[in-house]
Amino acid sequence: MTIISATTTLLSRADGSAQVTSSDGTTLIASVSGPMEVRPREEQPLRAYLEVLVRPVVGVAGTRERLLESQLVSCLTPIIRLESYPRTCIQVNIQLLTHSRPIKTSRSSPPPPTILSTALNASILALIDASTALRTTVAATDITINKGRHTVVVDVFSGQLVFVDSEGEFTHEELEEALERGKKEGMVRVDDGGDVMVVDEGGGVGEEIRRVVEEKVQRDLRWKDGK
């Protein structure tokens, strides 16, 4: 999977937002609100409460959306510096716009495989757009090998594995290959000194996320140049 297009700062009423379209035709918008007031039963004295809500193209959320929400919480919790926002709530909303595959009518059917990776990439960009404190930046990609499909999430700088979700039939060797390919797709390029190299074209998902963030920073700093 590759990112065809990605933009940030789309929604004026959200603290941060991003729209991502992947190579398989999946398009969705992620928005971030917070830190904001938290419901009393969800208040945590030492950290923020992370809430993720997923909305399908049509209809109401079902079991597949609840599963996706759980996966996103598992991915994002160690990345966001929740301890920086005690007694508050950080809310991430995912609105699916299109998908290349027909969405099954059964609410209990699992989400299409690429939605997880696209939703995570959009969430990271929206969190950055909202200036939410993060420990690092991650990138998610889908790797298919024979009958196995894997969503691999890695740190874009170190290549450290953050999360993996696999389905289908695969061997241990195929899983290892998928993790290695996911690492290659997710990392940005660095020089011998450890500095990030600027790549205008090409590269994987990590490079595309870097480019989108760089464009956002340039837009935010235009006022300094009087533009």
Image (cartoon, rainbow, N blue to C red):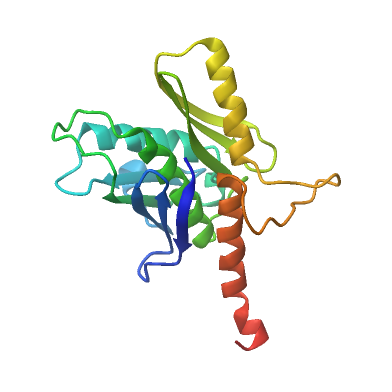
Residue furthest top as drawn: 171
Q: Residue at x 65, y 59 (%)?
A: 200
Quadrant where the C terminus sits is bottom right
Residue 131's place in the image compared with 39, above or below, is below
Quarter-of-image position of residue 113? top left
Quarter-of-image position of residue 110? top left
Q: Residue at x 35, y 42 (%)?
A: 42
Q: Residue at x 62, y 56 (%)?
A: 201
Q: Position of residue 23 (x, y in %)?
A: 42, 46
Residue 111 left/right relative to 122? left
Residue furthest right as drawn: 193
Residue 73 left/right relative to 104? right
Q: Position of residue 168 (x, y in %)?
A: 38, 18
Residue 177's place in the image compared with 106, above or below, is above
Which of 139 and 90 lies nearest the eye of the viewer? 139
How many numbered circles does the render carry? 0
Residue 110 left/right relative to 113? left
Residue 164's place in the image compared with 2, above or below, is above
Q: Is residue 90 visible?
A: no
Which of 12 and 41 lies nearest the eye of the viewer? 12
Q: Position of residue 21 (x, y in %)?
A: 40, 52
Q: Residue at x 46, y 14 (%)?
A: 170
Residue 193 left/right relative to 62? right
Q: Position of residue 10 (x, y in %)?
A: 40, 67
Residue furthest bottom as drawn: 226
Which of 90 and 179 lies nearest the eye of the viewer? 179
Q: Is residue 123 visible?
A: yes
